[in-house]
Image (cartoon, helix red, strand yellow):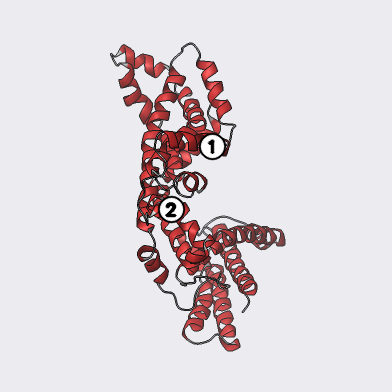
Amino acid sequence: MPLFLTLFIIFIVLLVVFVNQSTLVDYAGKKGYEGIEPGLIGLAPIIGVLYAIIITIIWELSFFHIVVAAILGLSLLILGYFNYMMKPKLRNVSRMGIVAVFKPRMFIGRLLIYGEIILIATIVIVPIVYIFGLAFSNIQSAIPNQIWPERPNLQAFNYLFEETGFGLWYWNTLSIALINMLVGTVLITGAAYVFARFSFKGKRAGLLTILVLQAFPSFMGLIAMYVLFWKFGLLGQPRALSILYIGGSIPGNLWLIKGFLSQIPKDLDESAMIDGANKFQIFWRIILPLSVPILTFVAVSMFMGPWMDYMLPGYLLNYYPPDAPVGYDVTKQWTLAVGLFRLINDMNYLHYSAFAAGAILVGVPITILYMLFQRYLIEGIMAGATKG
């Protein structure tokens, strides 16, 4: 079955299931039945879809099985409504109020809402499933035209760890990201605190200068960066890239944190000083705890920066030292972006499945960070959008 037709059928099935669930939940709510039970009953018709999937995996889906799946789903749908039709009303609602749930206007509204949600979810999820399928396909020189392989395997992961320097690339990138996150957040927070809480000559000019520097893209200084790294002997040194990442992130993040800190009342500082606290104690015990959301947002964004940046590492790390011995392995200096890009642009090392497997492993630490700090990230985004 063509991929587009398969996706279209899945879209229609999900749309029917979710519109039915929403309608049943509204109908049950009008009669006073709320909670998780109506939602689960509304999803019962999806059992027919599961039946069709299981038959496809075990045998082969035929017209007969499609009819059986449709009858099963429709029967469960009717039973769901019949269940609440027979139950007494727990809420004083008129018959017209209940019938309003099934009005065409309400039905069309649900179709549009859930259609848009499912479409957006499909656009986001299908590429992710495709990447996972490609990672378990072991395809080297051709791009697959199916989302999931018929025989998944781990050969691409074996190639990635045994035939490439993926482990070293991963460590280089992770160490840069950790330095970037820890050192950069500390430096930027200290500078932002000074600009937000102290008055000194040149403060306004300094802030404006930092703001102007943010307007220039980093690639404009590539030649200067290369010359400086060459003069200081930093070419081919992965951890040295932290200098550039931290420096490049200072302007925007400094203004972001400074704007947040400026909204913290200075009365708190004055009250603490009356109680005998010094500047450092005020910063450590009062300002930092109140700034956790914005600092978490900045720290995570700085951690993410080096993972898939190709321009700077490809320019500054692909360097052979003058005293390099014959057969010097320049790949040990690379980061993940440089190494993985080699798997899709170098005909001698072409391996699409290994590239997909590496992309999945790159997403692991970022996903874990987002899961751990999700609450703080949302608060930080909101604070950065409204304060300052």
Secondary element under disc 1, as helix, strand or loop, is: helix
Give, as a three-letter code, the residue at label 1: Ile
Q: Amino acid at mark 2?
A: Leu
Are there few (<14), some (14-19), or many (20+) residues within 10 Å of tag 1?
A: few
Name the foreground residue: 85 vs 51.
51
**Displayed quadrant of residue 64:** bottom right
In the image, taking residue 224 as reference, residue 364 lies left or right, namely left
The quadrant the N terminus occupies is bottom right
**Residue 329 in view (yes/no):** yes
Q: Nearer the viewer, residue 75 or 330?
A: 330
Q: Residue at x 46, y 46 (%)?
A: 313
Residue 69 in which image quadrant: bottom right
Q: Tag 1 or tag 2, which sits nearer the N-term?
A: 1
Q: Residue at x 43, y 33 (%)?
A: 231
Instruction: Tell how many labels.
Output: 2
Q: Would you place residue 201 above or below residue 99 in this image?
A: above
Question: Measuring 38% from the left and 58% from the top, which residue is drawn there?
Answer: 166
- Looking at the picture, how far across and down is residue 386, in whole percent? 55, 32
The label on residue 223 is 1
Q: Separation of disc 2 and disc 1 at Cα?
A: 23 Å
Residue topped by disc 2 = 336
Left or right, 175 with reference to 214: left
Give percent across and percent down for residue 338: 47, 53
Q: Residue at x 50, y 49 (%)?
A: 310
The kind of secondary structure element at disc 2 is helix
Q: Is residue 337 left or right of residue 66?
A: left
For label 2, the crowd category at 10 Å Cα-Cα, with few meaning under 14, some 14 to 19 and many 20 or more, is many
Nearer to us of marks 2 and 1 is 1
